[in-house]
Amino acid sequence: MEKIIEVMNLTKKYKDLKAIDHLSFDVYKGEILGLLGPNGSGKSTTINCILSLLKFNEGNITIFGKEMTPDSYETKSKIGVVFQEVAVLEELTVYENIDYFCGLYIKDKTARKNYVNEAIHLVGLEDFKKFKPKQLSGGLLRRLNIACGVAHKPSLIFLDEPTVAVDPQSRNNILDGIKTLRDQGATIVYTTHYMEEVEILCDRIIIIDKGNIIAQGTKQELKDLTGIEEKVTVEIDNLEPNKIEDIKKLDNVKEVNYNNNTLLITYKNGKSNFGNLLHYLNKENLVYNKIYSERPTLNDVFLELTGKELRD
Amino acid sequence: MFFHNFKYTLKSLFKNKSLIFWAYAFPIILCTFFNLAFSNIENSEKLNIIDIGIVENKYFQEDTVIKETFTKLSDKNNKDQLFNITYTSLEEVASLLNNDKITGYLILTEDSNKVVIKNNGINETILKYVTEEIFQTKELITNLATNTIKEEIQNGNYPIDYEKIYQGVFDIIQNQEVKINDISNKNLSYTMIEYYTLIAMSCLYGALLAFTAINRTLANMSHTGKRVSASPVKKWKLILSSLLASYVVQLIGITLLLLYTIFVIHVDYGTQILPIISLILLGSAAGLSLGVVISTAFKISENSKTGIVIGFTMLGVFLSGMMGITMKYIIDVNIPIVNILNPANMITDGFYALYYYTNTDRYFFNIISLAIFSFIMIIISSFLLRRQKYDSI
C-alpha cells in the first residue's frame, strides 16, 4: 500500500511539557485514519506539526514521499485542512468564503465556480449561499468550515474534530460528506474524541494519550486487545450477594459489578453467554426490569489501556 | 493568487462595519464636531489684536531684525495687524502684565531674548510662537553671515565677498518677511491645526486596517491565518496583497475626509497639491507599517490591538495639537523629542509647514521623518514576519 504520510519519532515540547513524545505512524492511500484521544492528548498538535505550522523538537515528516516544510507548496496544493476552530471570514457570505479559500488553490475561475458549487452541495448549504457566517447556526457553520477546507478537492484531507458541538442532523450530514470524500479517493486523517464517529468512519485507528500512541490497528484489532467479548447489563432490584457469586461462576464471566440496582457482567469470550445468563435468571425466578447486551467499545479499549475514560 | 487575495481582502475590509466606522465615519464625525465647536471661537478670536509689551532698551533698539518685524506686525494700517505694542520700561511692562493689561512682554538682554507671560492661553501661545520664529530666523541670519565670512577667510579669499553674504542674508530676510506676513491675523487660524491632526489621525488609523488584514494571514494570530498558511500561497504574496488592499481602503477614507473638509467645512489647505498628496501617501504608509508591527509583535486579541492603535493614535494627535495648538507648542518647546518621534506630529507639522512656510525645509524634515519611521516599522515587521513555523499557535 502506498504511504501518503510518514511520521517518524515526532516530538514536540512546550517548555518542559512533552505534548508529543516520539510519535511514529503511517497513513496509507485511500484510508480514513482516526486519531482518537481525549482533549489535550496531542491530536491537534500532531496535525499542526505535520502541516509544518508548528516547530517540533525531533522527528521527520514526509508527505507524498517528500519532506514537509513551510515551502512545500506543491505538497500543500494537494492538502485540505479543516481545523477544529471555525476559520472563515465574518464579512463574506457562504459562497464568497468558499470561493476565497478555494481560490488559494484553484486559479481558473470557471473550474473554481464548479468546485465551490460542488462543495456547497457536499455539505448541504445550497439554501444558505448568501448568508453570512453570523446568520448560520453552529452546525451550519461547521459545515461551512468543512466546505472551505475541501472545496479544492484535495487528495489528502485533515479533519480536526469537525463535529464538535454540532446538532445530530449536521453531524450526520458531515459524516456522510466525509464518506463521500473517501469514496472520491481522498485519504483522510480524522481526529476526534467521539469514539462513535471513529467506529463508523475509520479504517484504522490510532489511540493517543499524553502525546503517546497507546494502541493502533483496525477497530477489531483494538477490541481484541481488551480481551472483552461482550458486556451484559441487567437492571434488577435488590439482588442478593449469593446470587452475584453464582453469576460470577457462569462460563466466560470475567467481572461482575452491582451498583445502584444495575448489574454489569463482562465476558472474556465464548458463545451463548447471554442465553446462559437468561437461563440462570429464569431458573432462580429473578425479576429484572431491563436486560441488554453490548459489544466492547473503543472506550473500553481506552479504559483497559489507561485506566480512565476517553472523555475524562 | 495576488489579485484574488487583494480582491477578497478589499471586500472584507469594506464590509467590516467596525473598521469602516473608525477609518471613515469617526474622522468625519469628529471634523463636524470641531467645526461646530470652534467656528464661533475662531470668528471672535480673529477680531482680537493681542496687546503686548516690549522693554525699550538699547538691545532692542540695536536689533534691527526684531525691531522691524514687530513694527510690521503692529502696524495699525495693516488690516492683518497681529499685535498692539506698548514700548516702555521693564517695571512698566511688568506692572501691565500683572494687571492683565497685556498678554506678555518681550525683553532683549545681552545674553538672551525672552518672552514673559503670566497665563496659558491662545494669545500667549501665539505670542510665544511668533517670537520664537523671529528669534530663530534672526539666529539663522547671524550664523549665515558669520559662517560665510569664516569660510571666505579659510578659503583665503581676500577681500571678502560682502556682496555674496549680503545676498544670502537678503534672501533669508525676504523669506522671513513672507513667513511673517503669513503668520498674520488673517491666516493664523486656531482650528487649522485641528483639521491637520484629523488627517494625521485618519492616516494612522490605517494601522487598524493593516493589522486586521495581516492578522488573517498569520497562523499564530487567527484561525483563518492557520488555514491560509496551510495553503500553497507564498507568504509575501499574501502579506503584500493584503497590505495593498488596506492601503487602497485607507486612501479612499482620507480622500473622503479631505473632500468633506474642503467642500463642507471649507478648510483651505493651500495650493500645494502634490506635497499634500505626498504627505498623505507617506503618512498612510506610516500608519500601515505601524499596523503591521502591532499585528506581528503582540499576540493578543483583535479588540486589544484595536485599543492599542486607537490609544496610540489619539495620544499622538493630542500631543500634536488636536485639542489646541497650545499642547503642540508646549511639547515642541519643552520635550521636542516626543513630537520628533510622534508620527501624528510629523503629519500635522508637515501640513503646518506647507501652509505657513514658503521655505520647504520643515516640510521635508517631516517627510523624511515619516519615511524613516515607516522604514523602521517595516524592518521590525519583516523580522517578525520571517517566521513560517511557530512555537505555539
Image (cartoon, rainbow, N blue to C red):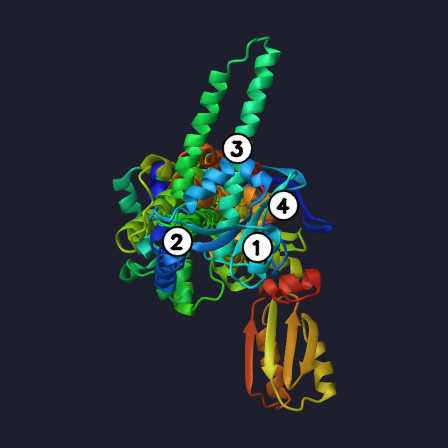
How far across and down, in percent of the image, does residue A115 sit? Answer: 31, 46
User: Do the dots labelled 1 and 4 sit on one chain?
Assistant: yes
Disc 2: host chain: B
Q: Residues within 10 Å of mark 3 (few under 14, many from 20)?
A: few
Depth check, front residue: A298 or B11: B11
Task: Tell me the residue that label 4 is attached to.
Answer: B391
On residue B111, the disc is: none
Instruction: Give the alpha-carbon distance from disc 1 to disc 2, as whole Å.
Output: 50 Å
User: Do the dots labelled 3 and 1 sit on one chain?
Assistant: no
Depth check, front residue: B64 or B250: B64
Instruction: Give the alpha-carbon distance from disc 1 to disc 4, as whole Å.
Output: 70 Å
Dots 1 and 2: beta carbons under 8 Å? no
Query: What amino acid type should be assigned to the residue bearing mark 4?
Result: Asp
User: Do the dots labelled 2 and 4 sit on one chain?
Assistant: yes
If you read the primary sequence from the N terminus, does the residue marked by circle 1 or circle 2 appear first?
2
Query: Of helix, strand and loop, which one carries label 2?
Result: helix
Instruction: Give the alpha-carbon distance from disc 2 to disc 3, as whole Å.
Output: 49 Å
Instruction: Give the alpha-carbon distance from disc 3 to disc 1, as whole Å.
Output: 91 Å
If you read the primary sequence from the N terminus, does the residue marked by circle 2 or circle 4 appear first?
2
Task: Tell me the residue that label 2 is attached to.
Answer: B23
Task: Tell me the residue that label 3 is attached to.
Answer: A65
Query: Of helix, strand and loop, which one carries label 4?
Result: loop
Query: What amino acid type should be assigned to the residue bearing mark 3?
Result: Gly
Q: Nearer the viewer, mark 1 or mark 4?
A: 1
Question: Is residue A216 visible in the rendered structure shown here?
Answer: yes
Question: Which residue is pictured at 58% across the width and 81% down the height?
Answer: A278
- Report which quarter residue B112 is drawn in: top right
Q: Residues within 10 Å of mark 1 (few under 14, many from 20)?
A: many
Instruction: Give the alpha-carbon distance from disc 2 to disc 4, as whole Å.
Output: 34 Å
Task: Tell me the residue that label 1 is attached to.
Answer: B93
